[in-house]
Amino acid sequence: MARAGWWSTVAETLDARPVTGWAMTRTLLGARLRAQASFRGSFAVDLVSQFAASLVDFAELYVLLHNAPVIGGMNLTQAGVVFGLSTLAFGLADLVFGQLDRVDRLIRAGQLDTLLLRPTSLLLQLVTADVQLRRLGRAGFGLAAYLVALAWAGVTWTPANVALAVIAPVGGVLIFGALFLASGSLLFWVLDGGQAGNALTYGGRYVSSVPGAALAAPLRAFYTFVVPTILVAYVPAAVLLGLPLPALLWPPMAWLGVPVGVVLWGVVLLIWRASIRHYTGAGG
Amino acid sequence: MAIIETRGLTRDYVAYDGSGLRRTRRLVRALDGLDLRVEPGEAVGYLGANGSGKSTTIKMLTGILVPSSGSVRTCGLDPVPSRRQLSKRIGVVFGQRSALWWDLPLVESFPILAAIHRLPEASWRPRFDTLVDGLELGAFLERPVRNLSLGQRMRGEVAAALLHSPDLVVLDEPTIGLDMISKDNVRRFLARDRAERGTTLLLTTHDLADVQRLCGRMVVIDSGRLVFDGTEARLAEATDAERLLVIDLAEPVEGGALASVLPPGCRLDAVEAEGRRVSLAFTAAISAAQVLAAVASRAEVVELALAEPAIEDLVRQLYTRESPTNAASRPSRTSW
C-alpha cells in the first residue's frame, strides 16, 4: 500500500467512515463463509448429501403416487409442484435460520453469554454464525423440482399466476423461518425441547410437501390456522394449477403466505425476546 | 461516579432435589447482599473458591443475569435493561469460553469484532497494533484459533476484549491454562493499559497468584458473602498465610544447619531426597528472595518452585482471625 509522506497521520490512510448495520452483517457473514471454505472437502460431501436426501424425499412421493395415481386430487406432476415449492422454501429458511434450533448447545456451553455481551442483536449473531451453505443443496433441488413440475403441469401463465409463482416461495421462507425461530425460543425454556421443536419445523415441512387435501380435516385445520404450513405450497400450487380446494381452504388464501409470514414473525419475535429475558432471569 | 456499585446485591437459584413426584424445590443463595464500590482506574482482584458466587456476580454486573434483590450499577447503567449499551463500555474475558472465530486465523477475529462494535478502521486499527505489540500476538496471528495453545488463545481473548477500549475490563478466571510467560505478558499489558487509559480492571480467580502484582485491591467472597475487602498487604497480614518455597539443591544439606541461617518468619517445613530438596514455609513479612538467599548461602540451588497459599486456606484464616460479621461489615473504603 502506498502510504503518504511522513507528515500524514494514520487516520488519513485508514477508513474512518462509520460502520453501518449492513456492513457489519456482511463482515459477519463473510467470516462464516471463510470458515466453511477452510473445510472444502467435507463441504462438497455435505452439499451432495443434502441434494441426495431431497432426492430420497421425492422418491417417497413418487412411490406413493405410482401406486395411487391421484393423491389429494393431484397427480405426480401436480404433487411435484407442491413438493418443489415446499422444498425450496424450507431449504432457504433452513439455510438462514436452520441453526436456531441448536441454540441449546450454546446455552449448555455457556457460549451464549459471550454473544449476549456484544452490542448487536443475538438473532443476527446466531444467524450469521452458523450459515450452512450445504443447505443450498436442498434449496437447489427444490428450485429444480418446482420449475420442472411447473413446466410439465401446464400452468396458464396469466400475470396473476406469474406473480403467485414468484411470491409463494417468499411467503414459505417467512413461515418456515418463523417456525425455526419459535423452535429455537422453546429451547430457552426447555433445554431438552429439541424434539418438540423438530415436530414444529420438520413436521411442518413434511405436511407442506404433500397435497393438503389428503390430510384429515382436523389436521388440515391445524396446519392452516395454527402452524400454517399448508399455506406454503399446497394452496398456492392448487391455485396455480387451477385445481379445486378442499373444505376450510379458499383460493384467495394462496396469497396469504407473505402476510401470514409477517404476522407470524411479529408474534415469534415477541416470544424470542421473552425467551432471552427468561434466560437472563434464570441464569442459564 | 463509581464504575461498579452494588448494594445488597443478592441472587437466588432454584434447585431441585430428588426426581419425579418427590422432587422438591429449594432456593439456593449464590450471592448474599454484596456491597461493592469500585472507582474508575482501580484494579480489583475478586477472589473466592469455586462456587463462592464469583461468576454469579460477574453475570449480574454485565447484564446477563437479573438480581433477585438489591441494586447494581455498572458504568452508571442498570446492566440488564441496558445490556447492549453497556457492552460497548465493558470488555469481558470468560476463561473457558471463546469470543474468537474458531476456524479462522486469529488476525481475522479483530475486524469482525470491530464491525460488531461499529468501529471504523481508523479507530480500531491503531488500538489493534498496540494490542499485538503489547500482548505479543505477532508470532501466531495467522494461525487458526483452534490451533493455538491455551496461553496464546487467552492472549488473543484478552486482546479481543480490549479492542473497543472499554472502561471496564472483566477477566473471569482468565488464567486457566495460561503458561507463565503468557501470564506475565497479560499482566504487564493490563498494568500499562490501566496507567495509560485509566481502565478499571476486575479479575476473578480462585488463585491468589493471579491477582498479586496486578490488583491493588482484594475482595474475597465465600459462600456468597463478602469476607474481606482491602489491600493485598492487608490481606496477607489478616490471613498470615504461609507461602511455600521448594528448592532442589546440588548437594545435600543438613536440616539443623540450614534452619540456623533462615530469617525470622521462615521455617523449614520438610527435608526430602536425602537433603537435596528442602521445603520452606514463610509469611508475608519476608520475601521469597530473602529465603532463597539464605538457602543459597549453604548450598548451590538447582531448581525452585513457589506455591502460593490456596484461597480455601486464606478464607479459613479470615474466619479464624476475626468473626466473619466484622469482616463483612467493614467499610470498604477505609481499609486502604
Image (spheres, helix red, strand yellow):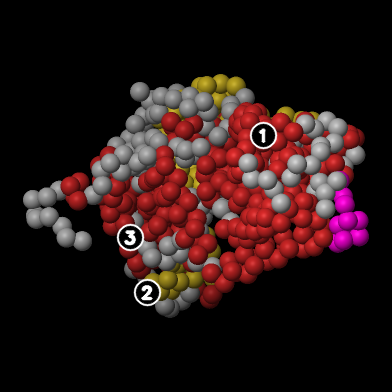
Position of the N terminus of chain A, as image quadrant, is bottom left
Q: Position of residue B254 (x, y in %)?
A: 47, 71
Q: Position of residue B96 (x, y in %)?
A: 54, 52
Cβ atoms at labels 3 and 2 below 8 Å apart: no
Q: Is residue A210 above or below residue A188?
A: below
Mark 1 falls on what kind of element? helix
Residue B16 visible at all: no
> Which label was assigned to residue A255?
1
Q: Tell which of A70 and A118 is nearer to you.
A: A70
Q: Say which chain tag 2 marks.
A: B
Q: Residue at x 82, y 60 (%)?
A: A62
Q: Which residues are magenta?
A: A63-72
The reply to whether residue B125 is visible in this rendering is yes
Residue type highlighted by circle 2: Glu
Q: Residue at x 60, y 40 (%)?
A: A159
What amino acid does circle 1 point to?
Trp
Label drawn at residue B300: 2
Have a look at marks 3 and 2 and say if they share a chain. Answer: yes
Distance of label 1 from label 3 (alpha carbons): 60 Å
Give the CA separation, mark 3 to mark 2.
Answer: 35 Å
Chain containing mark 1: A
Q: Which residue is mark 3?
A: B136
| Dot placed on the residue nearer the N-terminal end, 3 or 2 | 3
